[in-house]
Every structure is written in structure tokens, then in C-alpha cells.
Image (cartoon, rainbow, N blue to C red):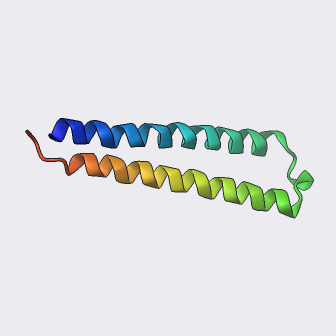
Amino acid sequence: MPCDATRHILSRAVPLVHESRALSYALTMTLATTPRREFTQDEVDALCQLAYEVQDKLAKASDLFRDVDNVPEP
């Protein structure tokens, strides 16, 4: 049933969006409150990894929402 498929897809997308928002907030707050010269190379690497994870989760959420567009109408 298309409605069930849509609900399933959306139920998978919602946690990705919430995680992405939380990761984005953490990254933003870290960058906003820390002087640039205080970052070590390991911290820069960790922030880059965090930024990558945000982008990855947003891409997955975007893919799921695209899947919703492909669910046939009843």
C-alpha cells in the first residue's frame, strides 16, 4: 500500500534530519566560540569529519524524500 511505503520512508528520514540538525548545531557552536588559532590539527580533522557526517546525513534524507516522490498515487 503506497501510504504505508510513504510512512516507512518518512520514518527513516526524520531521524536523519534531526541528527543532521544536531551535528550542524554542534559544529556551528564550536566554530563560533573558538578562536581559530586554538584549533589543533586533530581538532580541525574532527570538525571536517563532523561536517562530512552532516552532509552525508542530509544527502541520505534528501534521497529518502526523493523516494517519496516516486511512490505511486493510490
Total numbered labels: 0
Which quadrant holds the C terminus?
Answer: top left
Q: Residue at x 86, y 63 (%)?
A: 41
Q: Residue at x 22, y 37 (%)?
A: 4
Position in image of residue 34 (x %, y %) = 85, 44
Q: Is residue 16 left or right of residue 69?
A: right
Which quadrant holds the N terminus?
Answer: top left
Residue ranking furthest to the right: 38
Q: Nearer the viewer, residue 1 or 24?
A: 1
Please, is residue 9 above or below residue 60 in the view? above
Q: Residue at x 65, y 38 (%)?
A: 25
Rendered image quadrant of residue 24: top right
Residue ranking furthest to the left: 74
Q: Is residue 68 left or right of residue 1?
A: right
Position in image of residue 12 (x %, y %) = 40, 42
Q: Is residue 21 left or right of residue 66?
A: right
Rendered image quadrant of residue 55: bottom right
Position in image of residue 53 (x %, y %) = 60, 54
